[in-house]
Image: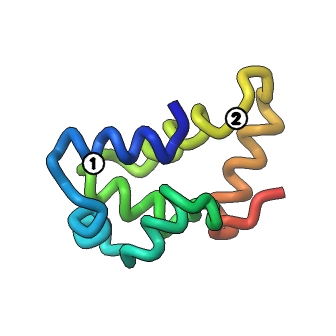
């Protein structure tokens, strides 16, 4: 399951619309749409934080879910370093 699918599943499980998710996550609806449906934007720290707030879960758990959905199985240390660079610089991933 990819990260967008996980968010859609969690949103549906709660009976929320994308507008409700955006409100609870303190994000714009266009930000939600850009990440979930169009793929135009990779999530950054603000997005991860908002999802963690909305779903009432630790930020680290959201980042781990994203990492598992976004990384190949055999990435190891280099993928983790890339993930932390991505989170720390707000969405710029090398």
Q: Where does residue 77 sit, x and y in percent of width and height? A: 78, 32
**Which sits earlier in the primary sequence, circle 2 or circle 1?**
1
Left or right side of 86 for 13: left
Left or right side of 24 for 94: right
Left or right side of 14 for 94: right
Left or right side of 26 for 37: right
Q: Which image quadrant is residue 61 in?
A: top left
Q: Where does residue 62 sit, x and y in percent of width and height? A: 44, 45
Q: Where does residue 29 sit, x and y in percent of width and height? A: 37, 74
The residue at 17%/45% (across/down) is: 14
Q: Which image quadrant is residue 88 in?
A: bottom right
Quadrant where the C terminus lies?
Answer: bottom right
The residue at 69%/68% (across/down) is: 89
**Secondary element type, mark 2:** loop
The residue at 64%/66% (across/down) is: 40
Marks 2/1: CA–CA distance: 23 Å
**Secondary element type, mark 1:** helix
Q: Could you say which is closer to the camera, residue 67 or residue 77?
A: 67
Q: Where does residue 71 sit, x and y in percent of width and height? A: 70, 35
User: Is there CB contact under 8 Å for labels 2 and 1?
Assistant: no
Q: Residue under circle 1?
A: 11
Q: Residue under circle 2?
A: 71
Q: Residue furthest top?
A: 74
The numbered mark at residue 87 is: none
């Amino acid at each position: 399951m990819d990260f967008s699918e996980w968010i859609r599943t969690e949103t549906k499980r709660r009976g929320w619309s994308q507008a409700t998710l955006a409100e609870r996550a303190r994000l714009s609806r266009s930000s939600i749409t850009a990440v979930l449906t169009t793929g135009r934007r990779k999530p950054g720290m603000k997005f991860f934080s908002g999802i963690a707030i909305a779903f009432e879960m630790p930020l680290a758990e959201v980042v781990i879910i994203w990492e598992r959905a976004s990384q190949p199985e055999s990435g190891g240390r280099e993928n983790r370093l890339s993930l932390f660079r991505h989170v720390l610089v707000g969405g710029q991933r090398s």
